[in-house]
């Protein structure tokens, strides 16, 4: 078995989670990763997940502050295929490690830059900490339902960094595809802002509709000011506390699933009672609250074990336990899929952690090297660089107009968790043919405004509406498969085989096909047939527990009011501001590009697997490792202000700010900036890092008093001028902040397209910018818009098409 990325050398100059995750995945699939550590070692060595994040990497210690260290880094870059950096704009250039300088010596270099706010616009030079980005784009205000107090809430799951890492990987792999045809390297740029923007399935488009039709449509929050659900989704996706104190997240969204759920709860009688016959839809808040309490009371009568017995007896009823990510390693589906592996390290002994994110049948990821000691490979690597030459650059060829020009993908995905991944690839020039049922992709009907929920996941795709349950429909699909390069499948277990679109069937038609299974749980196994939605996967993967932190009690005996308040907090924590659907979709795009790279390097296609469960676990990977004596990941405080006094929310006189100054150098800058307000720099309680940690509560109190004295915008301006990480927390909704703010607009993250029915509208530009082969953002399609064109292309005549439509095999758009 070959490694998908064997022969690639990656130079890792990053310092934050996003870059670290990028190079971990590249290393998992065979790339030689050289991690440059500063003297004294990488700060990530103090993290429990160090052994996961730094496996398959070599450690080289270089002082990039000195001329010798920078020269060695240049030598490494000259002999590398990929360079990953998360330096702020201009910082690498000042060290002689900017793209233009390095590309002059190594024209094939793929230079990937991950910043907080992008390389252009008014925030380009701001510090790019995760929480600063989340605060500025409205994500912390979006998470206000999670906090047990008024105001924004700190979000502990690094959704922006995880998503930026996936965008960077997609940019690197797309640029690699270009290089292997043209011999040309290029610059790849992405940011944490673009990462978190990718997470939202449809809120941004609802905002645009409300903006365009203010009298016809308006959006509303999921809960009233009194904390009562405003939508029936809260009942279909019930969050309840069991009699023995475990939180459960149900997933009964379809009418038949909800009906069986009500029967199990002993509440089916309500449909025969005139007072409750419209359940779960009610017009008044009082009615919704009473119905909610009845459901919570009925669900709370059973213990977890009793509910698990119900799930065995009633397969259509399903809920996930709100686990920690460490507990996720024991999830039966994770073991069945091979998503968990056990390793041995001389420093911590045996440990369990996540397997490589994408399971590949012919080029599987593997652990070749344990996480290194500081500088373990310095002599070896530098000696090799001085004495070896990797040879001439690849021969130059034609540069394509778009990175995935000529690649055809067939989309058998439903909802958002898989299909949006192909919308990302469409932005890079892939031709994506969406196979829809005659009634359309379910996302088209998920919101009251037709098609609004599906716009983002359908962007750039061609829509072919066909009934693949009949032989004539399957023949259409099989003809398309002959011309396809990649296939995405996200049907529940057993459905693909039933419909004749499983891997073995399609491989017989096209042996070079790269086929990705991307279900919620798995293509088979203990949970393969269970319904998987973003909240259930978020609960199972640990997002709910991680986000809600100690603000939610998990114990028996809570009052009904306590249960209601806590269920909102932990339920919202499992599904926002990032969520499992977004993580999974981003993972799908990365996986398919990885499969394409493996095919181009080895000559054969293969079957692959990602799952919502495993991909979301990677967003939570700081806690996805288990070994004796490991300490826990840093938890937010009980009120969800942040992690400590120097990385948390503070209330200003008119709003909120987020302060991020965790490093020693940043502490000194903060002391200087606040000297005229408070003498924290001369206070012995805060003289050293250990003293600050010991007296964290006192430091928080001192800063709380200071920051309340002035407006948030004033603090942002003053502290940013001193190069201290501080931003005013955006109060508008996250969609409004992302679609209207200078953070995105002036950074070049938005563009406009023309939709067949919605007209001209804003949307996100491609998530990574490739300097030589930029992608092209296109609009979504309407149902069946391309049925005629695609069928003609694969050999059907106009008469054939008319006959197939008359027989109910296909549907065609009437534009």
Image (spheres, helix red, strand yellow):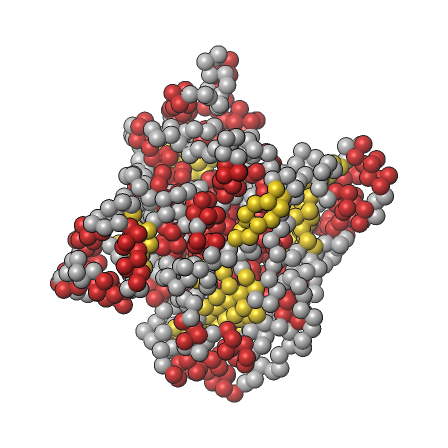
Position of the N terminus, as image quadrant, is bottom right
Q: In the drawing, does residue 385 fall left or right of residue 176?
A: left
Position of the C terminus, as image quadrant, is top right
Residue 293 percent across, percent down from the top left: 38, 24
Seen in the picture, residue 725 relative to 756 is either above or below; the reply is: below
Residue in view at x 45 percent, y 21 percent: 283
Residue in the foreground of this view, choosing between 20 and 812: 812
Number of callouts in the render?
0
Q: In the drawing, does residue 447 fall left or right of residue 403?
A: left
Residue 756 percent across, percent down from the top left: 65, 42
Residue in view at x 48 percent, y 33 percent: 218
Residue in the foreground of this view, choosing between 283 and 410: 283
Residue 333 percent across, percent down from the top left: 51, 46
Residue in view at x 23 percent, y 50 percent: 710
Residue in the foreground of this view, choosing between 654 and 687: 654
Residue most extreme to the bottom: 387
Seen in the picture, residue 130 relative to 447 is either above or below; the reply is: below
Among the 4 quarters of the image, the one containing residue 187: bottom right
Residue 173 can be seen in this image: no
Seen in the picture, residue 660 relative to 148 is either above or below; the reply is: below
Residue 13 can be seen in this image: yes
Residue 58 percent across, percent down from the top left: 45, 73
Residue in the foreground of this view, choosing between 644 and 655: 655
Residue in view at x 46 percent, y 48 percent: 740
């Amino acid at each position: 078995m070959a490694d998908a990325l064997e022969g690639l050398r990656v130079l890792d100059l990053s310092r934050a989670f996003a870059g670290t995750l990028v190079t971990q995945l590249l290393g998992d699939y065979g790339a030689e990763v050289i991690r440059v550590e500063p003297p004294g070692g990488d700060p990530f060595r103090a993290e429990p997940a160090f052994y996961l994040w730094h496996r398959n990497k070599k450690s080289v210690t270089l002082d990039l502050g000195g001329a010798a260290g920078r020269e060695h880094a240049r030598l490494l870059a000259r002999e590398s295929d990929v360079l990953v950096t998360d330096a702020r704009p201009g910082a690498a250039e000042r060290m002689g490690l900017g793209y233009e300088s390095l590309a002059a010596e190594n024209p094939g270099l793929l230079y990937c830059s991950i910043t907080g706010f992008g390389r252009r616009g008014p925030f380009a030079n701001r510090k790019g900490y995760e929480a600063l980005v989340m605060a500025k784009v409205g994500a912390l205000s979006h998470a206000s339902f999670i906090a047990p107090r008024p105001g924004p809430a700190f979000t502990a799951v690094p959704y922006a960094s995880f998503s930026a890492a996936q965008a960077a990987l997609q940019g690197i792999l797309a640029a690699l595809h270009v290089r292997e045809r043209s011999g040309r390297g290029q610059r790849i740029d992405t940011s944490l802002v673009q990462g978190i923007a990718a997470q939202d399935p449809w809120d941004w488009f609802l905002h645009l509709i409300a903006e365009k039709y203010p009298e016809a449509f308006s959006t509303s929050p999921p809960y009233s000011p009194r904390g009562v659900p405003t939508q029936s989704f809260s009942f279909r996706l019930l969050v309840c506390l069991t009699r023995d104190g475990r939180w459960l997240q149900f997933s009964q969204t379809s009418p038949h699933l909800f009906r069986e759920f009500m029967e199990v709860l002993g509440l089916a009688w309500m449909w025969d009672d005139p007072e409750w016959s419209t359940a779960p839809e009610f017009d008044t808040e009082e009615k919704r609250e009473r119905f909610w309490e009845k459901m919570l009371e009925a669900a709370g009568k059973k213990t977890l074990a009793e509910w698990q017995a119900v799930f065995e007896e009633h397969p259509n009823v399903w809920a996930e336990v709100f686990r920690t990510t460490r507990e996720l390693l024991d999830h039966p589906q994770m073991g069945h899929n091979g998503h968990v592996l056990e390793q041995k390290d001389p420093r911590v002994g045996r440990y369990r952690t996540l397997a490589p994110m994408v399971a590949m049948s012919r080029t599987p990821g593997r652990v070749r090297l344990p996480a290194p000691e500081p500088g373990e490979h310095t002599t070896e690597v530098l000696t090799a660089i001085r004495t070896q030459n990797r040879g001439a650059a690849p021969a130059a060829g034609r540069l394509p107009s778009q990175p995935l020009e000529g690649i055809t993908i067939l989309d058998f995905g439903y909802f958002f968790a898989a299909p949006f991944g192909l919308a990302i690839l469409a932005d890079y020039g892939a031709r994506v043919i969406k196979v829809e049922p005659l009634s359309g992709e379910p996302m088209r009907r998920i919101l009251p405004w037709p098609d609004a929920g599906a716009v983002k996941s359908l962007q750039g795709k061609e829509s072919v509406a066909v009934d693949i349950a009949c032989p004539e429909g399957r023949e259409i699909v099989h003809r398309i498969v002959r011309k396809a390069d990649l296939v995405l499948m996200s049907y529940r277990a057993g459905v693909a085989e039933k419909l004749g679109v499983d891997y073995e069937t399609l491989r017989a038609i096209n042996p070079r096909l790269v086929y990705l299974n991307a279900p919620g749980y798995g293509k088979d196994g203990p949970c393969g047939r269970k319904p998987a939605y973003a909240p259930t996967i978020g609960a199972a993967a640990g997002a709910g527990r991680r986000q809600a932190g100690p603000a939610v009690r998990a114990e028996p005996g809570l009052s009904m009011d306590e249960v209601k308040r806590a269920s909102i907090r932990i339920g919202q924590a499992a599904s926002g501001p990032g969520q499992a659907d977004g993580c999974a979709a981003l993972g799908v795009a990365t996986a398919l590009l990885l499969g394409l790279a493996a095919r181009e390097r080895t000559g054969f296609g293969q079957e692959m697997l990602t799952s919502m469960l495993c991909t979301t676990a990677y967003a939570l990977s700081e806690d996805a490792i288990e070994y004796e004596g490991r300490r826990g990941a840093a938890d937010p405080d009980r009120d969800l202000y942040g992690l400590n006094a120097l990385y948390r929310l503070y209330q200003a006189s008119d709003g909120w700010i987020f302060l991020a100054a965790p490093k020693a150098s940043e502490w000194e800058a903060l002391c200087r900036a606040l000297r005229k307000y408070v003498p924290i720099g001369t206070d012995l309680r805060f003289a050293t890092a250990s003293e600050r940690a010991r007296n964290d509560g006192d430091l928080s109190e001192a800063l709380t008093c200071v920051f309340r004295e002035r407006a948030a915008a004033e603090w942002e301006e003053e502290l940013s001028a001193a190069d201290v990480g501080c931003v005013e927390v955006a109060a508008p909704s996250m969609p409004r902040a992302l679609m209207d703010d200078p953070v995105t607009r002036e950074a070049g993250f938005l563009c406009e397209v023309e939709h067949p029915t919605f007209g001209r509208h804003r949307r996100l530009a491609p998530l990574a910018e490739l300097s030589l082969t930029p992608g092209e953002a296109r609009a979504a399609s309407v149902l069946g818009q391309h049925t005629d064109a695609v069928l003609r292309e694969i050999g059907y005549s106009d008469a054939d098409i008319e006959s197939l439509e008359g027989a109910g095999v296909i549907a065609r758009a009437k534009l």
